[in-house]
Amino acid sequence: MVFATASAPARTPIVEVEHISKRFPSADGSTLTVLDDVSVTLHEGEVVALLGKSGSGKSTLLRTIAGLIAPTAGEVRYRGTRLNGANPGVGMVFQSFALMPWLTVQDNVELGLRAQGVAAEERRERALQAIDQIGLDGFETAYPRELSGGMRQRVGFARALVGRPDALLMDEPFSALDVLTSENLRNELMTLWAQPDFPTKAICIVTHNIEEAVLLADRVLVLGSNPGHIRAEVPVHLPRPRDRRSPTFEAMVDQLYSILTGRDETSAATRAAVASPLTTPLPDVTVGGLAGLVEIVFAHDGQTDLPDLADELSFEIDDLLPLVDAARMLGLLEVEGAQAFLTDTGRGWYTADIQRSKEIFAGIVREKAPLVRAIVKALENSNDGGLRDDFFRDLLRRAYTAEDIEKQLDIAIDWGRYGELFDYDADTGELVLADVAAAISKEIAPGL
């Protein structure tokens, strides 16, 4: 989906990404597709935000633009030349700062120039200029351990800018910082960007924060998941500096929120047919969190504006996304644009007594939560109603990292145990059907 805009004069492309796909091998010899047929062009004079949920391939796309990851298919060009390695025209800022703790601020900033073979005196002059430009003058001899998180990220910016890159690539650079520090750094970055002598001609930032995308970007590319693909391209025609409280800013946030929470173009029947634990991960939420969201929507007469709700609760809009995704997956809420509506199922679950709510939840997750459904079916097909959790780890390895496998299992176990579908022994790693576990308990303690 591309939203129509008025025609604009042609701009010079810096980086062109054409129809790239990226697949990674899995432990069992199969492949995991992270990006599928993605095309992006980064032009001179613009800030582009790559906005998407976790797992949409944002960081993989950014590293492909940087030439740190080679695409499986398609190509990336810098100034018309196809990349066959690191992109010489970009600088990168990372979420984790990525500083060398044994080097001073100045040495960290000079690191890239040293690798390029720049002479010592020029390295020093350019590093000191970048340090001053980013507001760290006086800390040249300090070590990272002596700096706050915001100051360390300033070093990251100085290190990226000292090479005078054509394009500055940033991978969630403010997400590890407190709210005030991140807001100050965003404002300072935009101040630098507005200066005519700022050497960088384009910025591309990865973010999952909708308001950050609207604050910074001239164009927002919304990525969908499983695999990552461009769902929409949305221009941001707002003058800088941007006011979060303005109606046009809020309308833009609502528009992007609607795209992020909207259903894919595929039909409900098609989605149901392809839903599996490998293609449809469980959102990272607890049953208690789900119940809280449903209760709040119920208290709002069964419908609510999600951005307004986030503001009312003093959360970022993005914080609600996993809860909304889970409620939609389970049929507790319906979402149209930025509006959420309580379904009859959601109303029935919320108003039921404790035991009945467990029964309703059990039926819902068994039908609509792919991993929970898979666990129950596997246990039912085992000889004794029990299986080790390693069995499911091996199945999930085709599509998830080790960290995400544990997260998916934790969520499924939380949901399944609440619904009394199965029990889990963390010491032995054994999953057992609830009725089998109850029978075993009676045998062990018949008098209880």
Image: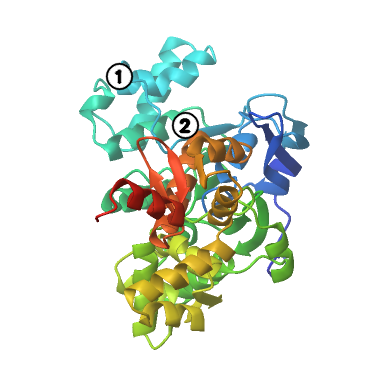
Q: Answer with mark 1 or mark 2, whichever residue precedes in sequence.
A: 1
**Can I make out residue 47 in this image?**
no
The quarter in which the C terminus is drawn is bottom left
Mark 1, residues whose alpha carbon is within 10 Å: few (<14), some, or many (≥20)? many
In this rendering, is residue 247 above or below 129?
A: below
SS assignment at label 1: loop
Residue under label 2, please give it.
160
Q: CA distance from mark 1 to mark 2?
A: 16 Å
Q: Nearer the viewer, residue 166 or 99?
A: 99
The quarter in which the N terminus is drawn is bottom right
Q: Nearer the viewer, residue 179 or 108?
A: 179
**Can I make out residue 81 in this image?**
yes
SS assignment at label 2: helix
Give percent across and percent down for residue 401.
54, 36
- Residue type at the position of mark 1: Thr
What residue is drawn where x is 54% and y is 77%? 334
Could you tell whether 200 is left or right of 72 in the image?
left
Give percent across and percent down for residue 162.
46, 28
What residue is drawn where x is 51% and y is 50%? 54
What residue is drawn where x is 46% and y is 58%? 421
**Residue 96 got which mark?**
none
Residue under label 1, please give it.
104
Q: Nearer the viewer, residue 18 or 126?
A: 18
Number of marks: 2
In this rendering, is residue 45 above or below 397?
A: below
Give percent across and percent down for residue 121.
41, 13
Residue 306 occupies quadrant = bottom left
